[in-house]
Amino acid sequence: MPGAPRGPYAKTAAQRDRILDAAMQVFARSGGRGASLREVAERVGMSEAGVLHHFGSKRELLLAVLDRYDRQEAAIDHPDTLPGNAAYARDLLTRGADKPGLFRLLITLAAEATDPDHPAHQYFVDRYARTADTFAASLRSAVNGRTDVDIEALAHLVIAVLDGLQLQKLLNDDVDVLRSFDLLTQALINTYAAP
């Protein structure tokens, strides 16, 4: 019967989790390029070789951190919300305000990943494409067949606002991201909702 790992596998899984926790903190503070395996190793009380035993390279560790984020995000229950709608986006902003390290990590890495040679470049290209598709589907439904609305451009606008609000919150904790997002949502409804 499958279940939680036992024996040496349980220790390996627990050690990988500890490494990923430390790596997330280091990558969030220093970015993908500035982060060092040495610092990750020191945070978990092991050698760099020990970290490399679990993750073959710094690139693999970075991608494992991003994969872990995606799995955690997928596991969160969003009652009565579908990805792409305003309630879901508002929920993301709320969780971002509660966990600034996570959004610092994503914003830092996304900015670095604009370089096509960055190890997370394709991850962020794909992530933004999925997010744009999700928001576009929700917006398409909200405008109820209107043909005068550029849905794709509007989806990218919403993503840009979400990213910008998260960045502003990291720079200034007094920024009320939820109020700002609610104003945008109301403006979109007033402008684009089907008559």
Image (cartoon, grey):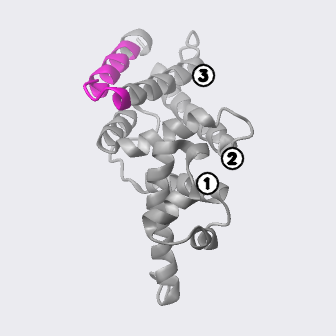
Q: Amino acid at mark 3?
A: Glu
Asked if the residues shown at circle 1 and circle 2 are in contact, with their CB atoms under 8 angstroms apart, the answer is yes
Q: 184 or 49: which is nearer to us?
A: 49
Is residue 162 visible from the viewing direction of this image?
yes
Q: Which residue is mark 3?
A: 152
Residue at the spot 58% in from the left edge and 32% down from the top edge: 111
Region of the chain picked out in magenta, as a range: 169-188
Which element is circle 1 on?
A: helix
Which mark, by number, is residue 63? Answer: 1
Q: Position of residue 17 (x, y in %)?
A: 46, 67
Which mark, by number, is residue 119? Answer: 2
Q: CA distance from mark 1 to mark 2?
A: 8 Å
Which element is circle 3 on?
A: helix
For residue 20, above or below residue 100: below
Q: Please identify the dominant SS of the magenta region.
A: helix
Q: Position of residue 85 (x, y in %)?
A: 42, 33
Residue at the spot 52% in from the left edge and 79% down from the top edge: 12
Q: Amino acid at mark 1?
A: Leu
Is residue 133 visible from the viewing direction of this image?
no
| CA neighbours of label 3 inside 10 A, class few (<14), some (14 to 19), many (20+) | some
For residue 186, above or below residue 91: above
Q: Position of residue 76 (x, y in %)?
A: 38, 53
In the rendered view, does 129 fall on the left or right side of 1?
Answer: right
Q: Is residue 156 magenta?
A: no
Q: CA distance from mark 2 to mark 3?
A: 27 Å
For residue 8, above or below residue 45: below
Asked if the residues shown at circle 2 and circle 3 are in contact, with their CB atoms under 8 angstroms apart, the answer is no
